[in-house]
């Protein structure tokens, strides 16, 4: 399988690239800052420069041609709402349109639990905006003709993966190691029968290598 990753130099992205390459997939990893090319290369993926904000849909599609699937784990950093809209919102829309143009039919999106960080003593407007942008992105992707899977992990941790998750259409909010999210996405990418589904994901008791 040929997989095109967006956010390949990130925490989930580079773990996912390592897993896909280890099992024999061909992986292209899109990164936006020149210094991230080595990170992508070290994961075993082929580094491809690109930017969800400055690239057009046509430019993104050109990079995706020849790939079977897209895995999107990009996100904006910080609380700049315009950046969040441009990356997590419009960026996802551009990526989905590009995948359709390029014929990369399978599309796995890393989203977020709708109830993440609810009930905080001091609610953050930036986080509320991020959560809303992610939800709009989910709705956009769900309306495309792609073979999509939306994965909504709980709070991501840097702990070593356990190989065990709780996954389903609605699970109780919790945290989950990035290792286990990457393993779950790797499994989802190669299971065509898991299609047009939203999967919430936390640490848990089931094997993490697929839905
Ligand atoms: N953190 C959590 O607890 C949590 C919880 C649930 C879901 N999520 C979601 O999980 C996913 C993966 O998280 P993570 O920890 O792996 O994130 P991460 O380490 O921040 O990785 C995100 C990657 O996206 C890249 N990116 C940002 N803007 C881009 C653009 N315009 N064009 C191309 N690439 C761009 C970043 O590059 P730069 O370094 O250049 O910005 C970075 O390499 C995200 O979608 C996030 O929203 C996170």
Image: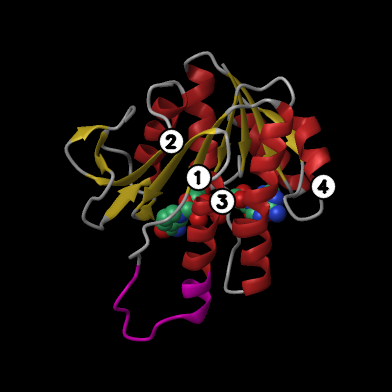
Q: Are marks 1 and 3 in contact (CB under 8 Å)?
A: yes
Determine the secondary structure under disc 4. Answer: loop
Residues at marks 1 and 4, CA–CA distance in whole angstroms:
21 Å
For the C terminus, the image quarter is top left
Label 1 packing within 10 angstroms: few (<14), some (14-19), many (20+): some
Q: Where is residue 99 in the image (x, y as percent from the top left)?
A: 67, 34
The vertical placement of 166 against 127, above or below, is above
Ligand 1 contact, mark 1 (Cβ < 8 Å): no
Q: Do the residues labelled 4 and 3 touch (CB within 8 Å)?
A: no
Residue placed under numbered mark 1 in the picture? 142
Q: Residue 56 carries which label?
A: 4
Mark earlier in primary sequence (3, 2): 3
Q: Position of residue 54 (x, y in %)?
A: 81, 54
Mark earlier in primary sequence (1, 4): 4
* Left/right of residue 30 with respect to residue 123 in the rendered view: right
- The stretch of residues the image draws in magenta is 117-129
Q: Do the residues labelled 3 and 2 touch (CB within 8 Å)?
A: no
Please state which of residues 61 and 177 is positioned toward the viewer in this rendering. Answer: 61
Residue 123 among those drawn in magenta: yes
Please state which of residues 70 and 160 is positioned toward the viewer in this rendering. Answer: 70
Determine the secondary structure under disc 3. Answer: helix
Residue placed under numbered mark 3 in the picture? 140
Q: Residue at x 77, y 43 (%)?
A: 50
């Amino acid at each position: 399988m040929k997989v095109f990753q967006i956010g390949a130099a990130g925490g989930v992205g580079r773990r996912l690239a390592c897993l896909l390459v280890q099992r024999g997939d061909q992986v292209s990893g899109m990164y936006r800052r020149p210094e991230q090319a080595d990170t992508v290369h070290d994961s075993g993926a082929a580094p491809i420069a690109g930017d969800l904000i400055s690239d057009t849909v046509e430019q993104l599609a050109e990079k995706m041609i020849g790939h079977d699937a897209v895995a999107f784990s990009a996100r904006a950093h910080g609380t700049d709402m315009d950046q969040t809209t441009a990356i997590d919102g419009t960026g996802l829309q551009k990526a989905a349109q590009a995948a359709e143009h390029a014929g990369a039919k399978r599309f796995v999106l890393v989203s977020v639990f709708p109830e993440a960080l609810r009930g905080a003593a001091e609610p953050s407007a930036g986080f509320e905006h991020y959560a809303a942008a992610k939800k709009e992105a989910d709705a956009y992707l769900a309306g495309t003709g792609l073979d999509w899977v939306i994965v909504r992990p709980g709070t991501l941790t840097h702990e070593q993966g356990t190989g065990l998750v709780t996954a389903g259409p609605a699970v109780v909010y919790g945290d989950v190691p990035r290792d286990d999210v990457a393993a779950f996405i790797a499994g989802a990418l190669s299971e065509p029968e898991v299609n047009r589904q939203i999967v919430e994901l936390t640490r848990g008791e089931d094997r993490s290598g697929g839905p």
